[in-house]
């Protein structure tokens, strides 16, 4: 998620970041343009099956199959993770925004 989205109540997202299988990371607005600007995507890899990439929009979803396509999207996801704040920095950022924006 971007830091701009933290200005909206995020509820369960903060709690999800505490789960051992979830890494919550904020992509700061200062990171500039990134591969996520093109739209959201989900990379899925199932044991014994070819990888699948799902691209969702308001009215439909597109499933892309094949190792080459999946590798391109996996690389895009890795770029986002590397550009985003670490999970620890993300927690600090979320706390800071919650304290400054949501307290009365």
Image (cartoon, rainbow, N blue to C red):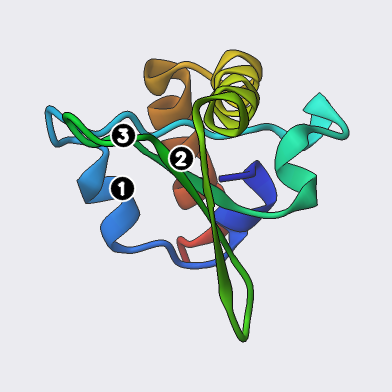
Residue 22 image-quadrant placement? top left
| Residue on which the image places disc 1 | 14
Judge left or right: residue 18 versus residue 25.
left
Q: CA distance from mark 2 to mark 3?
A: 30 Å
| Mark 2: few/some/many CA within 10 Å (<14, 14-19, 20+) | some
Q: Which circle marks residue 94 in the picture?
A: 2
Where disc 3 sits, the SS reads loop
- Quadrant placement of the N terminus: top right
Asked whether the beta carbons under mark 2 and mark 3 sit within 8 Å of each other, the answer is no
The residue tagged 3 is 45
Q: Count all numbered tags in the image, as a single digit.
A: 3
Q: Position of residue 12 (x, y in %)?
A: 27, 60
Residue at (60% x, 25% y) in the render: 68
Left or right of residue 97, residue 95 in this image = left
Q: Residue at x 46, y 47 (%)?
A: 99
Is 50 or 42 nearer to us in this picture? 50
Marks 1 and 3 close (CB-CB < 8 Å): no
Q: Answer left or right for 46 relative to 54.
A: left
Asked if marks 1 and 2 touch (Cβ < 8 Å), the reply is yes
Q: Residue at x 26, y 38 (%)?
A: 17
Which residue is nearer to you in this view: 26 or 68? 68
In the rendered structure, which disc, 1 or 2, sits on the residue that comes first in sequence? 1
- Name which of mark 1 and mark 3 comes first in the sequence: 1
Residue 3, compared with residue 91, is above or below; it is below
Residue 38 location (% of width, % of height): 79, 49
Whether residue 102 is situated above or below residue 92 in the rendered picture: below
The x, y position of residue 47, in whole percent, is: 17, 30
Query: Which quadrant of the structure image shows residue 97?
Result: top right
């Amino acid at each position: 998620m971007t830091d701009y989205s933290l200005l909206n109540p995020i509820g369960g997202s903060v709690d999800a970041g505490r789960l051992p299988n979830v890494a919550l990371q904020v992509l700061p607005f200062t990171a500039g343009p990134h591969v996520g600007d093109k739209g959201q995507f989900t990379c899925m890899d199932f044991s014994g099956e070819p990888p699948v990439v799902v691209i969702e929009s308001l009215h439909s979803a597109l499933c892309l199959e094949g190792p080459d396509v999946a590798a391109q999207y996996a690389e895009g996801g890795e770029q986002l993770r590397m550009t985003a704040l670490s999970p620890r920095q993300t927690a600090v950022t979320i706390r800071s925004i919650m304290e400054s924006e949501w307290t009365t």
